[in-house]
Amino acid sequence: MILFYREFGIEIPNDDGEFIPEDWYKTDPERYISAIKQFSNKQVSINELQPLDLAYFAISRNIITHTGIMISQDRFVHMSPKSGFLISKLERHWKRRFKGAIRVIQ
């Protein structure tokens, strides 16, 4: 994701400068979403999505730990630890886990 936005001249940090323990989401579940929202204050609903929006998802325990970059109104690219680079459709599985998006490029 960092390299993707860099192509547009947008630098997105790799971390928040603090040590990230393996189970960070248990002790600070808001950490990931707080970092995402620092990139932009333009919140986008699921009905307003457009290419290059940064969508975020709660994979388990309703804690946001996953992001993707929209490439159309209903498809996004993201990384999976098991499968690597993926293009997924924002339906059923992902729609249920969608928690919001921000417009990084205005």
Image (cartoon, grey):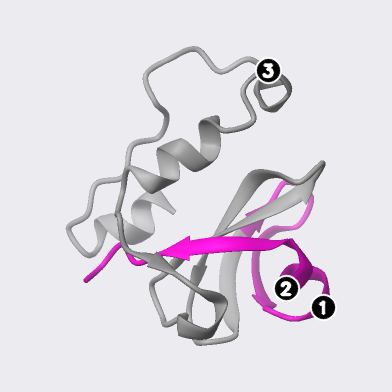
Q: Quadrant location of the N terminus?
A: bottom left
Percent position of residue 81, x then y: 73, 46
Q: Determine the secondary structure under disc 3.
A: helix
Specify the amino acid type for callout 3: Thr
Please name the residue shown 82% across and 41% down the image: 61
Q: CA distance from mark 1 to mark 3?
A: 29 Å
Indicate yes or no whether the magenta region holds residue 19: no
How packed mark 3 is, by other alpha carbons closer than 10 Å (few <14, some 14-19, many 20 or more), is: few
Q: Quadrant location of the C terminus?
A: bottom left
Q: Which residue is mark 3?
A: 27
Q: Which residue is mark 2?
A: 95
Indicate left or right for 78 with 27 as reference. left
Percent position of residue 15, x then y: 42, 29
Indicate yes or no whether the magenta region holds residue 90: yes
Task: State the image quarter where residue 40 is shown.
Answer: bottom left
Please name the residue shown 64% across and 30% down the image: 29
Name above or below for residue 9 compared with residue 60. Answer: below
Q: CA distance from mark 1 to mark 2?
A: 5 Å
Specify the amino acid type for callout 1: Arg
Marks 1 and 2: CB-CB under 8 Å? yes
Magenta stretch bounds: 79-106
Q: Where residue 92 is drawn, which disc sits there?
A: 1
